[in-house]
Amino acid sequence: MWKEALVLCQLLMLGWPLWAQEDPAAAAAIAPQDCNLECVRQGGPGCEYCRITRADVEKTLGFRSVEAFGSCIPWPCFELLGEEDPEVCQHYVHAPNDVTVEFLHDQNPKSDNIVVSWKPSYYGIAFLRGFQVSLQALGGSHVACQLFLFHRNLSLPASHAERVYKSDPFPSLSLGSQYAVTVMALPVPEEWERFYHSKIFSTRSCAEKNGLEKCKKDWYPKHIEVQQKGTDIIVTFNLAPPSLDIRGYFSLCYAKGMKKYMDIRPNSTKNKTHHSYQLHGLQEGTNYTCEIAADLVDAVRKKFSVQVIHLQQGRVSLPLSRTSLALMIPLGLALVAIFVILLAVLTRRRPNLWMKKLEIKPDIIEQHQERSTQQEVMSLPSNRLTPPRLLICYCSHDGPAHVRAVMRLGAFLQQHMATQVCLDLWDSLSLAEEGTMGWHCRRIRESDFVLVICSRGLRSQPSHLDPEGDEEEADEELGWGSNTSSSAAAIPLIGEEVGRAKARGQDLSKYMAAIFEYSEETDIPAELGLVAHYTLTRDLPLLFSHIHGVALHRPGGYLKIEHISEEGFTKLPAGAALQWAICEAGMVLREKEHHSVEGGD
């Protein structure tokens, strides 16, 4: 028995070097080689896994490709390898597996750097000709693409399905943003759908990459200490580092419908690390939820709790006995009841005495009191399970500042007006899949309301252009690039829907038109003249009333919502950002008008 065991042990020892040689090869990721397309076509020995540059593609095909797409083109196998032997690109290969994203060291504190890795699938690996890796920013315009090819004589064995292949780095990615990376296996036959693998990932935030003390946008106080001195609350918190140049803070405490806002301006010459401030006027025996943050737009808020302890009046060192406490509680309640009764009697008699003295008719005072407006708390209709869906359409011909104002409006409506906003800038992937007209047609059907932001660019849009085929031509005529994101092409559809609904006697409340303060009523197209018009931000309460079906006025009362009133919405970070975006767009528009007038002279 021991002889058989010895032979087995020797065989295992002899086989160990072979295993030791295979493991590193399987574990090490294969990086792309720097070789040209001609080497790939000829099947040279140094061209096993090559990166294909944009210059190679332009030289082979004879035309300039779009810079944003790098070396990627439609049907790369057919275009670059299938000219001499089309059968090379006719086989089916499966999508790659285990797609991962790895962050690389990047000295730039404002951006991230990644590399993508993956494993090829077992299925069809012998016919695999390469990979195409694309990166798309979700809700943005950033696009990058890389193409990698094997030389034409290479046929991978099934064991290579355990090998890991890598892309080149994707640099300069915005921090705190979402991206979708897609790894496509080549070739891609026309009727095959399982040729790619997509993965959505987020880049690191500034705090995750550089640390909280180096990020102005993400900074918030981490150390907060709360003490009670009498009826006042003393809050101590750590200040931001001087390098961030944060000079102001704010505190907000709320409980039982009460709010207390406080602006904080520390004196850094006295203490550069901590600051203390007092909260006055808080009710005893009440638990408050407080927030503190830097006085910046969309700053991160730190929450903490404040419990105001009820203090006894008089000598605190002499506690009451149980007997005296039991006697004082009923006595106190009786005194309160007597006081309330006397107050009610005096309140009723006092108007009658004054009326007799001044000889004023009581019915006149009653009529005046009925006409006086009362503020009431009103709730939204509870029969809706989800927030109303609002599609925002606009025209980008007035420039990036106008588009930023539209985006800020959408963010404010979604955050503070209980509305689910649909905006083409936030759904780039679906927009690319369905096309501009297809996406807007579906959204118009699915949305509860449609809001058209009218501007001068919408009024001056050429009417002879076909909204489906000539949108890019219109952008070029107006001085904007062909990549401009605009939903202006869908506005004629909305006008047709409004006219059709009017002819049938249907409700037109689904459609609304609005202008910002720098636009004019004449900017609203004639086809939208039948729908409700609003001027933003002045009519935010009216827009809220329209969307939620809540009356602002009724006999004896009116609805007032502080954070969407004309003077109150700017207290919110999103509202302040919206107001600034509108002001900035107005300044840009006025500057354009001034230059056009000077050019005409």
Image (tube, grey):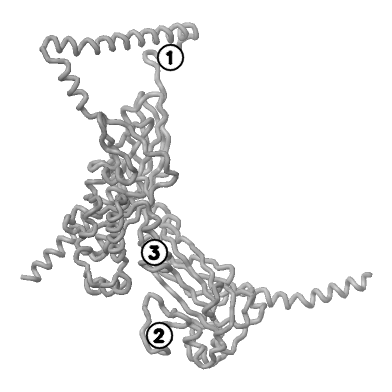
Inspect the image, locate mark 1, and give the three-letter code of the amino acid beneath it. Answer: Ser
Sequence-wise, which precedes: disc 2 or disc 1? 2
Q: How many badges with numbers are in the image?
A: 3
Q: Is residue 379 above or below residue 103?
A: above
Closer to the camera, 372 or 134? Answer: 372
The answer to whether residue 579 shows anywhere in this view is yes
> How far, Cα to Cα, is label 3 from label 2?
35 Å
Q: Position of residue 317 (x, y in %)?
A: 43, 14
Please rate how many residues cluster around mark 3, counting C-alpha atoms within 10 Å: few if below 14, some from 14 to 19, many from 20.
some
Q: Position of residue 37 (x, y in %)?
A: 48, 88
- The answer to whether marks 2 and 1 mark residues whose Cβ atoms lie closer than 8 Å is no
Q: Residue at x 12, y 68 (%)?
A: 596
Inspect the image, locate mark 3, and give the three-letter code of the amino acid beneath it. Answer: Trp
Q: Which of the image's four quarters has the C terminus?
A: bottom left
Inspect the image, locate mark 2, and give the three-letter code of the amino acid beneath it. Answer: Ala
According to the picture, the residue beneath numbered tag 3 turns out to be 439
Helix, strand or loop for disc 1: loop
Circle on res. 55: 2
Helix, strand or loop for disc 2: helix
Circle on res. 317: 1
Q: Is residue 173 above or below residue 58?
A: above
* Residue 480: quadrant of the picture: bottom left
Closer to the camera, 14 or 595? Answer: 595
Q: Mark 1 vs mark 3: give the one in front.
A: 3
Q: Residue at x 50, y 80 (%)?
A: 148
Q: Residue at x 13, y 15 (%)?
A: 361
Please rate how many residues cluster around mark 2, counting C-alpha atoms within 10 Å: few if below 14, some from 14 to 19, many from 20.
some
